[in-house]
Image: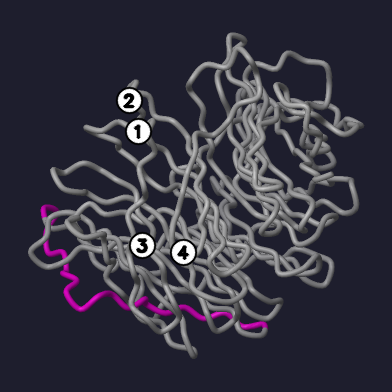
Amino acid sequence: MGRGGKASLVSRFTVTALLATACLLTAGTATAEGSSTPGLRLAGVWAPLPKGAPKKANVVFGSISCTSSTSCVAVGIYTTFHSGKTGTFDLIETLRGRTWKAIKAPLPANAAANAYQTLEPVSCASAHFCVAVGSYYDRSGALMSYIEVFSGGRWRAWPAPLPAGASSRIGGILEDISCPSSSSCEAVGHYPDGPYRSVPYLVTMTGHSWRARTAPLPSNARWGTSLVSWTPDNLESVACSSPRDCEAIGTYYAQGVGNGIAYLETLSAGKWTAHATAVPSGGSLPNSLLTTVSCPPSGPCEAGGGYAAQGGKPEGFFETVSSGSEPVASALPMPARASRTNPGSVVLSVSCPASGSCVALTHIRSSSGRIEAFLARQTADSWDQQLAPVPAPDAKDSRVIVSIACGAKSFCVGVGSFNSRAGGQELVDALSSNRWTPWQAKLPTAVGRAGAALQQVSCGSPTVCYAIGSYNNNKGLLETIRRG
């Protein structure tokens, strides 16, 4: 998904949505409840469905990528119900100007009649070039990955290539993609290589051609020989700052170690290199996990995740990765509100608009025992964090932020949900003027607010971001978040 990579492995959950008439809410300058500071203009639309689709259909969003204040692509699926039968179709929502339009995405020519397809995620290099990856069943019954490309004003789909020697009967699964230019993309995933092992692999677009290769692993990787020693090595997320500089994160299994270990792949000067993860002093590599990675236009990338600290307590950490260098780990500082006995912290999403200037969202168990969302900011090599604020005076303690993105160093947005006496409600936390301010998303019509949530956000300019979400589990929500 561009420079930022996938927002978070943990946050990639799905909700269903029932189509309503798309209706843009005209919003004036919004003011956060509990604050006299104006700052955002919020507007929402119900997600439209493609022409000819029935009005009663469920929408599941997967990903969004924005390249300007007037250009975004969101992808997912929609499900129809007719005469006791269910149909699933890929959905592409495109923003041009201030209007969203939906189409049913094409599938590869060898797709089965009921392909059970999914489309997620998407990365756009410009308004004229986007690539999404997904999975489907072909007519032989094999589960395959496919590539969906927008170029020349139309979408085209074809099966994703596999490395030489990989079984075409059991295809690979692509998990993420990053396109730093209209002639360069990197996708990552895994494919089965024998009955007891999956192998990470890379699919690279150069010009108009795609090729696949098996990804390198750290030198101490082991090979599964039985169900007991099964090794599901994989790559899960990738971020690129340029066509020749990318970082990917995943998990591998090492010799003599029973649990998975986080690792990184770095692309530098055209070559991918595997690096075993470093963890903070006193930490344990087994059961370490990297969940998110972001690369600024220049300078080191930042990856985030969790590891087992002293006493086996799970704690969050960051991994700073410079091109061609070994990663450097730093522990996530614990806020005063965190539990002192079992903070259970993990970094879920990170966004880096500039070198040494990143923001991240974390989940930490508080002293009350609840898992709470915190927002972290990087200054030079240090991080500080605060509890994610909520807008409603009657908000309960529970709050969940699932995605974060920055349009500029001075403007970042985190999205998710919080609980109030009325139930679950959508949450926008915006960083502006060095201050996090909470807001509620604007819904398109005068319906009750309970049951709304935002799932992922992408910023196309220094002043405008867009988020995907749902309302009451039966309406897709597309939210504009405009600064000033």
Mark nearer the N terminus (1 vs 3): 3
The residue under label 4 is 302
Say which mark, if any, is on residue 367: 2
Q: What's drawn in magenta, residue-wise?
A: 208-228
Q: Residues within 10 Å of mark 2 (few under 14, many from 20)?
A: some
> Furthest residue to the top?
421
Residue type (three-letter) at the residue carrying disc 3: Gly
- Front in this rendered view, residue 152 or 311: 311
Residue located beneath label 1 in the image: 338
Q: Which tag is nearer the camera, tag 2 or tag 3? A: 2
Q: Is residue 212 magenta?
A: yes
Residue 45 in which image quadrant: top right
Q: What is the C-alpha distance between the residues marked 3 and 4? A: 14 Å
Q: Estimate the spatial distance between the alpha carbons at disc 2 and disc 4, rounded to whole Å.
A: 28 Å
Name the side, left or right, on which 285 lies relative to 179. Answer: left
At x 20%, y 78%, the residue is 219
Q: Earlier in the sequence, mark 3 or mark 4?
A: 3
Give percent across and percent down for residue 345.
Answer: 34, 41
Q: CA distance from mark 1 to mark 4?
A: 23 Å
Q: Are marks 1 and 2 in contact (CB under 8 Å)?
A: yes
| Residue 16 in which image quadrant | top right
CA separation in Å, label 1 and label 3? 28 Å
Q: Nearer the viewer, residue 481 or 2?
A: 481
Q: Amino acid at mark 2?
A: Ser
Which is nearer the N-term, disc 2 or disc 4? 4
Front position among marks 1 and 4? 1
What residue is shown with label 3?
250
Q: Residues within 10 Å of mark 3 (few under 14, many from 20)?
A: many
Which residue occupies 91% across, 32% down? 28
Residue 169 visible, this orientation: no
